[in-house]
Amino acid sequence: MKKKGISAIVATVLIVLITVSSVAIIWIAIVPMINLGNLEGEHFAVLVITSESGYTVWDEDLQSMSVQVNRGDDDLDIIGIQFVFNFEGTSISKIVYDVPEKIS
């Protein structure tokens, strides 16, 4: 008696095992990489630019911008803030490292 192939039951079991293994590999390896809450080195602070009754102003004569930023409720130590200003299609980026500590 010659066997020409594997039985349908064994083939079905193998397909199910391959599928479960693939899902497990994706779940363990890929999902943590796309989880935005666990990105290493990237955290987001709550910051609000005060545009009314504050010190956020554009000085046309000096071509200078002053920005008042208020801190929201978060537990992060901020070491810098990057501002990006757009003027007539041109972007100017400025990173400020002199950031005061959060006032409790």
Image (cartoon, grey):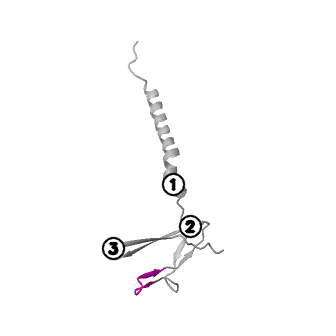
Task: State the residue position of label 2.
Answer: 79
Name the one closer to the observer, 47 or 92.
92
Q: CA distance from mark 2 to mark 3?
A: 29 Å
Q: Residues under labels 2 and 1: Cα distance?
A: 24 Å
Name the residue that disc number 1 marks: 35
Stretch in magenta: 58-66
For the point 60% across and 66% down, which residue is it? Answer: 77
Element assignment for label 2? loop
Q: Residue at x 62, y 66 (%)?
A: 75
- Give amino acid for label 1: Asn
| Residue 101 placement: quadrant | bottom right
- Quadrant where the C terminus is found in the figure: bottom right
Q: Are marks 3 and 1 in contact (CB under 8 Å)?
A: no
Label whose residue precedes the other's in the sequence (2 or 1) = 1
Task: Compare marks 2 and 3 and give the one earlier in the sequence.
Answer: 2
For label 1, the SS is loop
Does residue 59 show up magenta in the picture?
yes
Dot 1 alpha-carbon crowd within 10 angstroms: few under 14, some 14 to 19, many 20 or more: few
| Pick the front one: 54 or 90 | 90
